Image: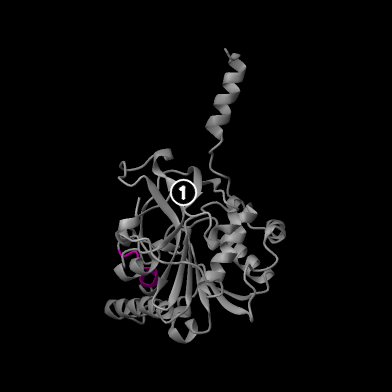
Amino acid sequence: MKLHPLVLFIFAFSASTSAQEPEPFELSDEWISQIEQSAPSTTTIPIKGKKEILIFSLHTGFEHWTIPHTEAVIKTIAEKSGAYSVTTSKDISMFEMRNLKNFDAIVLNNNCSIGDKRDLFWDVLKNDKALNDQQRMKKAKKLENNLLKYVKEGYGLMVLHGAIVMQNKSRNFGEMLGGSFDYHPKQQKIKVKLVDSQHPLVQAFEGEGFEHVDEPYFFNNAYFDYNFKPLLYMETIALEGMKTNPKDKIKYISWIKPYGKGRIFYASPSHNAQSYENPKILAFLLDGLQYVTGDLPCDDSVLGKSGAK
């Protein structure tokens, strides 16, 4: 069947615009109200008492426009569920051990660092005139070690999108998270798929993946140990703008993992606040909070190199 030129034009135009980057917008009360209406009313697993959550939203490097939106989303789903009390901060003193112990879990929100060191704590401390460089480095390392110790002792850590870059050159931080950030191609439509549709932490998606426009994150270093339980993935064959043609045909973009007695939840989605308008993503993130705070027991046995695809 031969199509009319106008039909061909409309089809080509639609295809070329379907994956356009969503436009940034200012956080508003109206948008937060929309998120609140879409968020789950209760947690998947009933809890016995409220947990204390810290959302840490400081960045020193690339500024994701969704930082305030992501903070508002986590705060909204946490408080609407009735399961959590939320504190927000951009102060690195929150990583002093005396402060960390006030929280059952920490949420790292797009905490991109900058420069050669890729160390957010150093980025802040390098401006402290009361310290010399050696003292700054010592304190930066202490704050990072505090976070590692905090999780290892049994607390939780949720890491969202660019937050994986926070201590991106730290081997210990990368091993705790399950990988380090390598790069991302241009924003594009991503078909997100479920690794195991029966896993409790993806039940919000009702057996199906989802599509959205996002930065397709690629990881390196500890990622290739596959020392995590993958939840979501994307197929590399469907992506544009990769540096090289990867040997592994799928890339995991969300996972959970134990770390000592504690728990890690990582989710690369999302670079754009529009993705949070999907109620299933909101439910997924709330389940992630339940996992890191120890209320949602599930299989978090690591995949390991032998199980990688």
Q: Secondary structure at mark 1?
A: loop
Instruction: Residue at 70% x, 66% y: name it.
Output: 41
Residue toward you, 204 or 184: 204
Q: Residue at x 67, y 63 (%)?
A: 40
Asked if residue 240 shows in the view, the reply is: no
How many discs mark residues in the rendered view? 1
Is residue 100 inside the magenta stretch?
A: no
Which x, y percent locates residue 146?
Answer: 39, 80
- The residue identified by callout 1 is 215
Q: The N terminus is located in which quarter?
A: top right
Check the image and report above or below for 242 versus 229: above
Question: Looking at the picture, how far across and down is residue 215, in whole percent?
Answer: 46, 48
Q: Residue furthest left?
A: 134
Q: Which residues are magenta?
A: 117-123
Residue at the image point whose x is 30% and y is 67% from the top? 171
Position of 171 with respect to 204 (left or right) is: left
The residue that appears at 33% across and 81% down in the rendered structure is 131
- Residue 218 visible, this orientation: yes
* Spot occupied by residue 224 in the image (x, y as percentages of width and height): 31, 57
Q: Amino acid at mark 1?
A: Glu
Q: Is residue 263 above or below residue 242?
A: below
Q: Is residue 275 left or right of residue 259?
A: right
Category of crowding for the residue at label 1, using alpha-carbon neighbours closer than 10 angstroms: few (below 14), some (14–19), many (at least 20): many
